[in-house]
Image (cartoon, rainbow, N blue to C red):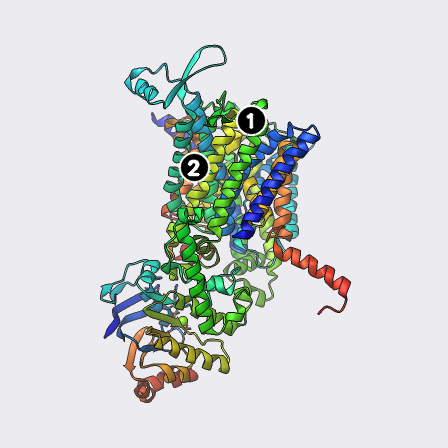
Amino acid sequence: MNLDLFLQYVVAGITYGTIYGIVAIGFNIIYNTTGIINFAQGEFVMLGGMTAVTLARVLPLPAAILVAVLVTTVVGALIEILFIRWLRHPSVLRMIVITIGLSILIREVALHIWGEGVRALPYFTGTSVTSIRLGGVYISPQVLWVVGISAVVVAILGGFFRYTLLGMQMRACAANRDAARLCGISAKNMVTLSFMLSAGIGALGGCIVSPITYVSYDSGVPLAIKGFTVAILGGLGNSAASAGAGMLLGILESFSVSVLPAAYKDVISVAILLVILFVRPSGLFGSAEVARLKEF
Amino acid sequence: MRKQGLQIAGFAAVVAAIQLATFLTGNVYHLTQLTMSAYYSLVVLGLCILTGYAGQISIGHAGFFAIGGYLSALLTTHNFSAHGGRVVSGLAAMGILARRPDLYGGELLTVHPWPACILAVFAAVAVAYAIGGPVLKLKGHYLAMATLGFGIIVYRIVLGTELVGAADGIYDVPAFPLLPGIAVSGKSSLRVMNYYVAWGFVILGMVFLMNLVRSRVGRALASIHGAEDAAEAMGIPTARYKLKIFVVSAAFAAVAGVLLTHYNGGIGPSESSVMKSVRYLAIVAIGGMANLWGALFMSLILNYLSLRGYFGSFDDAVFGVILILIMLFAHEGLLRRQLLDQIRGAVIRRGGGDDP
Amino acid sequence: MTLLSIRDVSRRFGGIQAVDNVSFDVPHGAITAVIGPNGAGKTTLFHLISGFLRPDRGSVVFGGAEILGLMPHQIAAKGMARTFQQTRLFPKMTVLENILVGRHLHSRGGFVACMLHLPFTRREERAVREAGREILEFLGLSGQADAEAVRLSYGQQRMVELGRALACEPRVLLLDEPAAGLNMRETAEMGRLISRIRERNVTILLVEHDMSLVMDISDEIVVLSYGQKIAEDVPSAIQRDPEVIRIYLGEGDA
Ligand SMILES: Nc1ncnc2c1ncn2[C@@H]1O[C@H](COP(=O)(O)OP(=O)(O)OP(=O)(O)O)[C@@H](O)[C@H]1O
Ligand SMILES: [Mg+2]
């Protein structure tokens, strides 16, 4: 393999990895405030992408993306309000099954709205053949959009959690629900907010990659499992590490295609998930001691 | 024990009554879907004991079903005559390989269904043993994700492998001669017999599992579900018990996979899809989690309705909705004694008025 | 004669030295109590002895054999049973069934035998139920045999947990605060029960905060504070030990 090809693989890996990172951050936001792993996380990405594609026919692209993100955010809020909010001390098993049910439901609704077809947004700048030469590699400008927008999102999110009152309240909830409630923070609203944030970010991710990866009603599950792999790889709840872990998985996956048939691509990333769960469930950067406490 | 015998006899009577009803109403072709429901019920029962009783969730049981079904299908359809060699002729002499005519008048040298079936179930059991150790150390979300991951791996492999027909799956799988005169086969002339064979397997499985539940081992499994550390303190080797019940439940799925594949004459990748695994889990949940009879009846009804196409294009959606509703409003399951008691209590209260 | 011998056992959690170089012997047939203020490391010590936690250092010898590093169920099989500070009854099981789980080590039917319901498992099951009912009789809970265990009063739940451990027919029984949360009448009842268990030739190691109970029934007392053993003696001597008095009185001021 020459250097150019090598770099080409890296770029492809980074593109996919960014999205895995975004899905992982979505997992983390909800996990941190509720202790729930939302199995429907991938569905937010699909929903965002599909809605934007439809809207892009009547609206200018930025407006279509904006509305798609808002719509998905509302869906996120509705899900929390209708299905999660009023449950009292639900068991882990129950939460798993409910979010799996929601994932099926969203997927089936999408199937009935949009059919089985594969769709994509137009490239934000240029077309699928436009490319920029950077060093020895040709990069689609869309890759720069994906990485750029994701970086901005991660930065804004970091700022939100660190500097805004709302963000700090959410963190307080994550650290200790009861204490936060005593300080007058509405834990329930924070949970709703975390579902909205997580849905919105997922939807945005779905919009920005759809020109490259395409989107169809059933693209949610693979994204969810890979996003979860990344979340575990980075240590559940640790969003900064997720971004890095996303790149790692994306690149591994992209190189796997050079040794194994492309049909087995998903096998690789899921196998990585299993291996991590077996040998280091605390993630690459987490401590084993902390992970043991999280054995819910 | 007496009660258990009566329950089984009652269920056998229901099975016979259904057959009689289809005969009298001239709906004999419904038996095909009812037979398929029976094999899916075997998977559900195995999962019920694992998830409902021992408390270990699995969202990957379609994977074990597929390992059984695919392996048996592959071995009984792959033509070995081209391979030649001493090994092949030796196997043929031992009766492991058997000659049979193909559809076009030629001759095939394939593995006899019996050794194929044994090998297929054995392979599923071996896989369950191998992954069960590390997987069952996990709890909660991690366990769910790991089993889901296993299911996805099996699905992706069968979907991506030409040898097993990729997206088309394997077809022209021969009938399975269980005993002289009894064959698992989709031939319409054997429809009634196969209906009874299939439900016979279910009843047999049910007897085994009911015995297990009411035994020392069953109590140990339930105690692992209830409080794993306390179970360990009582001297129960929790890791080994979890592994064993995982293997038992995988074996149920694999046997079902083998038999249904021979009944249908083929198997496709959708049998290993995540949605199938979720469906099995949904049925266990609807049946009441730790409730073998509930799971069995729900499996009979829902699989039958689904296979007959009553849910139309909303097939998966129906299971999704039921799953959510059950988990939201009756997460102990529908068919459970407490609920009946509650209803009875409500009725009595309304009727009696002065009940405390 | 020493049945259980704890030697230089230590365990650290992050910055906390929960158990610090503790050594003592549990004589056969006696009631030995471990006392100490909250957070002294008593429960951690129990977890170390019964195999639920691995110590950083030390050794535990039970009936002449090293048991450190064994799994909890292996230690249980050697004749050690325990209860938990927080009641750990099996929900969705009746009182009798809870007790029957305790008979696990005294029956053998495996997966296949149980699935086939072989004659020997039937005989075994009858014997197990017999033994279970005897234990209920001993606890005075025969009337509650078929009630769901977690629906009993708190005091009765603790009794069931004790009975479940007793069903293991252990050589040594570790009780972590058996009287915590019990009222005075129930505490007295629990004390009587523990004494009667000792009469059945069961060695008892006990953690308890209720001083009158401890002084009443124990033969030997070990005092822990901040993970360290600071005293070990007969009850009357412990009551007069200035260091122990300081710790217990000082705790109130802090
Ligand atoms: N799993 C753990 N992780 C971290 N710290 C722990 C853990 N278990 C116990 N500790 C700490 O070790 C110390 C000893 O705790 P332990 O529960 O053994 O005390 P105890 O004597 O049983 O107290 P109590 O009388 O309140 O039951 C405490 O400071 C506790 O916070
Ligand atoms: Mg304690």
Check chain identity for marks 2 and 1: say if they share one. Answer: yes
Dot 2 corresponds to which residue?
A269
Q: From what the image shows, is residue C87 above or below residue A147?
A: below
Left or right of B321 on screen, residue A232: left
Q: Amino acid at mark 2?
A: Ser
Residue B86 is situated, as x and y percent measured from the top left of the image, at 28, 18
Q: Quadrant of ligand 1?
A: bottom left
Q: From what the image shows, is residue B117 above or below residue C29?
A: above
Residue displayed at 43% across by 57% down: C125
- Name the N-terminal-most of marks 2 and 1: 1
Dot 1 corresponds to which residue?
A126
Q: From what the image shows, is residue A92 above or below residue C131?
A: above
Number of marks drawn: 2
Chain of the residue displaying label 2: A
Q: Amino acid at mark 1?
A: Gly
Give the residue furthest to the top.
B105
Do the residues bearing badges 2 and 1 touch, measured as CB atoms within 8 Å? no
* Quarter of the image that includes the C terminus of chain B: bottom right
Q: From what the image shows, is residue A185 above or below residue B165?
A: below
Marks 2 and 1 sit apart, C-alpha to C-alpha, by 31 Å
Give the secondary structure at mark 1: loop
Residue B222 is situated, as x and y percent measured from the top left of the image, at 47, 55
Left or right of A127 on screen, residue C103: left
Establish whether ligand 1 lies closer than 8 Å to the Cβ of label 1: no
Labels 2, 1: front one? 2
User: Which dot marks residue B7?
Assistant: none
Mark 2 burial class by Cα count in 10 Å: few <14, some 14-19, many 20+: many
Mark 1 burial class by Cα count in 10 Å: few <14, some 14-19, many 20+: few
Residue C188 is situated, as x and y percent measured from the top left of the image, at 46, 82
Residue displayed at 52% across by 30% down: B260
Residue A292 is situated, as x and y percent measured from the top left of the image, at 40, 56
